């Protein structure tokens, strides 16, 4: 009798254990996923059979095989009757894919190279972490995928990360590390903030002083995030800028990861560095100006009534069009006080001549001029929301040029105004989506009050105030300003994993999001981030794992 009872107990326990779902470590969480029991172990020498793929899709498979073999040594390759099939399925959304893993093998379907890439990224992501990290890890002996059926596609087409390289400069290699981590989590836009009051980083053949005089600050703020100290370097910073070859290299590198690069040259505000190089383009050429070594909003802005200043803007558009092969150019347009225009005779005369009632109309005129130039290259403009939301801004003109609005300040109203005018909107609110901000109260000196933590970022719901068509809600972006962030370790440490939380907002349907589940997945991803040598905060973790050298082991902050 006792024995029978024991057998019964074991049987019940086995059933319970077998029915508890196995953990599939996939971020962003997929649109649809059914988890089965058991695994498929990838055999050495496994063959992959491609069916109906376009040449571009075929090269995704070739790259996957080469990457997979480098990190696992399993020697897989293409061939007939393979245990893995990769197939064209035209029914699937662009960027979407279907993945079926059974105990017998793998079937992956997509309709586009991007969709196939994301399907292959999912396979890498749910295998042991060294596969996604691209590192050989001899201790990992077998490579098993959980039995699972996934039908996936992103919630939004724009899933971005912005990096400010003006306030502090970041090298091409430092940017590539961020592109890599973006690709782990299916982000697809790198917004490169190339110029600001503190430094000009874009090469311009016709204006050589931009990347010498305009790319050197007299001093710079350094933050030692581990020691929680901030100080002035006490020496010039720069000249720092990219060469055209470096820019092309970044664009190519990103392209392979299905990331489009969105260049930004912020005009006509945030333009001090350029006007130190070319003071004649300012509203007060005789002013004593220096490249800024501090943050803030300058009232010293481009003289948009000067044809030579407009010409510089057009030359910028031409230069960006040459270097960046994508349909959009970001011209900033944020934080542009009009007082310098009000005090300038040329600007006042132009207002009078054009019958302008509000100095903001000078900015509207400038935006239209830049849009016309961009249109010559078949491109359109991205702008920050002030271009739409400041008093006197011209929503009809923005609609006419089909601008897209990056909503960061007064976001509920900005999103509402953009979408009600039929303009595309990107959601990147200061606070939870400004991922350079301090995420705890006693963190290193930096921006924000210290409450923009991972949970706040994760639980922020995009586009709650949008009106009209959902088609205008184009996507989300993690935005990273670098006034306080002087080195790549600190940048990564602040960005991760908040950027990953935003990646999930960009990909996963809102109703499928779950912070506790995200925490569990991020805790597991410490291994992936460690293998990549990334710095990241562990404040979100369920238990202290991982080896980031950040000063924030749980319990300390
Ligand atoms: C911004 O934060 N000034 C776009």
Image (tube, rainbow, N blue to C red):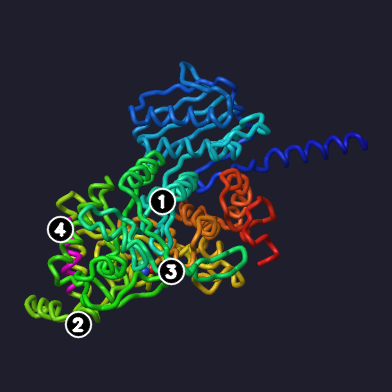
Quarter of the rendering occupied by the C terminus: bottom right
Chain part drawn in magenta: 362-373
Dominant secondary structure (helix, strand or loop) of the stretch shown in magenta: helix
Q: Earlier in the sequence, mark 3 or mark 4?
A: 3
* Mark carried by residue 218: none
Quarter of the rendering occupied by the N terminus: top right
* Mark carried by residue 342: 2
Which residue is tagged 1?
A: 155
* Mark carried by residue 372: 4
Q: Earlier in the sequence, mark 2 or mark 1?
A: 1
Foreground: 89 or 370?
370
Q: Position of residue 293 (x, y in %)?
A: 41, 70
- Secondary structure beneath label 1: loop
Dot in front, 4 or 1: 4
Q: Position of residue 536 (x, y in %)?
A: 58, 55
Question: Do the numbered discs 3 and 4 sit on residues whose CB atoms are within 8 Å?
Answer: no
Foreground: 175 or 327?
175
- Secondary structure beneath label 3: loop
- Which residue is rendered at x = 26% and y = 73% of the image? 301
The furthest residue to the top: 80
Real-space CA distance between mark 1 and mark 3, rounded to the nearest whole angstrom = 43 Å
* Residue 420 shows up from this direction: no
The furthest residue to the bottom: 343
Dot in front, 2 or 4: 2
Real-space CA distance between mark 2 and mark 4, rounded to the nearest whole angstrom = 25 Å
Q: In this rendering, would 53 be left or right of 145?
A: left
* Mark carried by residue 219: 3
The furthest residue to the front: 235
């Amino acid at each position: 009798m006792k024995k029978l009872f024991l057998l019964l107990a074991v049987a019940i326990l086995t059933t319970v254990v077998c029915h508890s779902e196995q953990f599939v470590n996939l971020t962003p969480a997929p649109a649809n996923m059914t988890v089965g029991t058991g695994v498929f172990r990838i055999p050495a020498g496994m063959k992959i059979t491609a069916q109906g793929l376009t040449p571009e899709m075929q090269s995704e498979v070739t790259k996957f095989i080469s990457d997979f073999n480098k990190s696992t040594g399993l020697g897989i390759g293409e061939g007939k009757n393979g245990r893995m099939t990769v197939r064209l399925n035209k029914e699937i959304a662009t960027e979407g894919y279907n993945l079926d893993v059974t105990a017998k093998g793998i079937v992956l379907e997509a309709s586009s190279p991007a969709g196939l890439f994301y399907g292959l990224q999912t396979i890498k992501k749910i295998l042991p972490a060294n596969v996604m990290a691209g590192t050989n890890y001899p201790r990992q002996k077998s490579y098993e995928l959980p039995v699972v059926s996934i039908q996936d596609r992103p919630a939004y087409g724009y899933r971005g990360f912005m990096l400010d390289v003006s306030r502090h400069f970041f090298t091409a290699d430092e940017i590539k590390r961020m592109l890599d981590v973006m690709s782990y989590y299916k982000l697809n836009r790198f917004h490169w903030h190339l110029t600001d009051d503190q430094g000009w980083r874009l090469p311009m053949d016709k204006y050589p002083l931009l990347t010498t005089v305009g790319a050197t600050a007299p001093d710079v703020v350094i933050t030692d995030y581990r020691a929680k100290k901030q100080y002035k370097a006490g020496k010039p910073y720069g000249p720092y800028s990219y060469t055209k070859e470096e820019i092309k290299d970044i664009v190519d590198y990103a392209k392979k990861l299905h990331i489009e690069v969105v260049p930004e040259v912020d005009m006509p505000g945030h333009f001090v560095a350029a006007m130190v190089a070319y003071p004649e383009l300012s509203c007060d050429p005789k002013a004593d100006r220096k490249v800024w070594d501090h943050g803030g909003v300058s009232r010293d802005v481009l003289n948009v009534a000067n044809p030579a200043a407009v010409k510089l803007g057009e030359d910028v558009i031409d230069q960006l069009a040459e270097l960046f092969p994508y349909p959009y150019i970001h011209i900033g347009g944020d934080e542009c006080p009009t007082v310098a225009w009000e005090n300038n005779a040329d600007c006042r005369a132009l207002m009078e001549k054009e019958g302008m009632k509000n100095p903001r109309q000078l900015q509207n005129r400038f935006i239209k001029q830049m849009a016309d130039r961009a249109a010559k290259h078949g491109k359109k403009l991205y702008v920050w929301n002030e271009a739409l939301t400041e008093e006197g801004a011209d929503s009809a003109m923005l609609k006419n040029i089909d601008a897209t609005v990056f909503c960061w300040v007064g976001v509920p109203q900005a999103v509402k105004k953009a979408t009600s005018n039929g303009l595309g909107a990107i959601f990147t609110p200061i606070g939870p989506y400004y991922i350079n901000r301090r995420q705890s109260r006693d963190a290193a000196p930096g921006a924000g009050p210290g409450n923009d933590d991972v949970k706040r970022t994760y639980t922020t719901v995009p586009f709650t105030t949008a009106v009209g068509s959902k088609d205008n809600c184009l996507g989300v972006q993690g935005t990273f300003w670098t006034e306080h962030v002087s080195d790549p370790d600190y940048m990564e440490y602040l960005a991760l994993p908040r950027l990953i939380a935003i990646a999930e907002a960009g990909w996963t349907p809102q109703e499928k999001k779950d912070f506790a589940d995200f925490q569990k997945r991020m805790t597991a991803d410490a291994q992936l981030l460690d293998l990549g040598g990334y710095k990241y905060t562990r404040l979100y973790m369920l238990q202290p794992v991982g080896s980031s050298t950040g000063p924030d082991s749980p319990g300390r902050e």
